[in-house]
Amino acid sequence: MKKLTSGILVLTILAILFSCTQKQPKDATGLLAEIDKNDAPNTLSPSEKKDGWQLLFDGKTTEGWHGYNLKVFPDCWAIEDGALTMNTTGSAESLDILTSKMYRDFALSLEYKLTKAANSGIIFQIAEDPKYKFPYETGPEFQVIDHQNWPDTLESWQINGANYAMYPPVAQPYKALGDWNQILLVVKGNSVTQILNGIVVVKYEKNSEEWNKLRNSGKWTAFPDWGKYDEGYISLQNHGTKVWYRSIKIKEI
């Protein structure tokens, strides 16, 4: 009986250990490996569906998106060749579009393509409220920009792949103009990882000593609610220059 009890105890411990291992969330690299690079644009492979990914854009309709502080989809955006893009010109901040749902812990994958001197970004953890004019007043931004042809000198935290006005990218794996780039943004609690074309370009811990120092010493001192929210909408920024977005998919983690 003693040997049988010992055997049962060992099996129970092994089962618990296996269960704990199975429940461990994947890191950003593991989530990146789930993206099927052979997918047709704006589709999900069977393995992606199995892993819990969902399409946010089907390449044909604007369902699931609306203008910031609007209930409708703005006409300054359009669908061209299976991609979301802007109609506005002039390089000024215009109307951004938001997901219809708020997200807290997630992995966001998408592809983007730039025109010369184009400027845009993916903003997240956004609060939608009439007291704010733009999403960037509350949410951090994965910077999307053709900084090589930008007419003005830029800071390192303004170039492609940066966490805008906070963290410069540690690598610059962007592709040539006219080519599609792939982004993966992973937000899990206070941990944020930005991946561009398979390379980690930014990684930070929100509310850390470093994060607070950067947040309270630069541009965001003029925006008291910036970085305040842990759950919020995700937006594509319209800065009056031409950028295309497609294959937008998300997984809640």
Image (cartoon, rainbow, N blue to C red):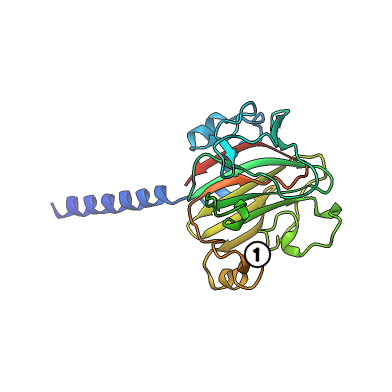
Toward the viewer: 17 or 156? Answer: 156
Q: Does 250 appear above or below 166?
A: above
Q: Position of residue 117 (x, y in %)?
A: 83, 49
User: Nearest the camera: 16 or 50?
Assistant: 50
Name the spot of residue 54 as percent of width and height, x first.
52, 35
Give the residue furthest to the front: 131
Left or right placement of residue 60 versus residue 88 in this view: left
Tell me where residue 185 appears, x and y as whole percent: 60, 50
Number of marks present in the image shown: 1
Place of residue 238 in the rendered image (x, y in percent of width and height, measured from the top left) = 70, 45
The residue depicted at 84 percent of the width and 59 percent of the height is 152
Left or right position of 228 against 172: left
Instruction: Please name the residue shown 66% across and 44% down the image.
Output: 95
- Determine which quarter of the picture holds residue 209: bottom right
Residue at image point 65% right, 64% down: 166
Q: On screen, 222 above or below 187?
A: below
User: Residue 38 sits in which quadrant?
Assistant: top right
In the picture of the structure, the residue carrying the numbered disc 1 is 166
* Residue found at the very far left of the displayed protein: 1
Residues packed near mark 1 inside 10 Å, few (<14), some (14 to 19) or many (20 plus) = many
> From the viewer's perspective, is 42 left or right of 144?
left
Q: Secondary structure at mark 1?
A: loop
Amino acid type of the residue that numbered disc 1 sits on in the rendered structure: Met
- Of the pair 225 and 147, the residue shown nearer to us: 225
Q: Is residue 43 above or below residue 17?
A: above
Give the camera-side residue of 28 and 115: 115
Q: Is residue 5 visible?
A: yes
Q: Is residue 31 visible?
A: no
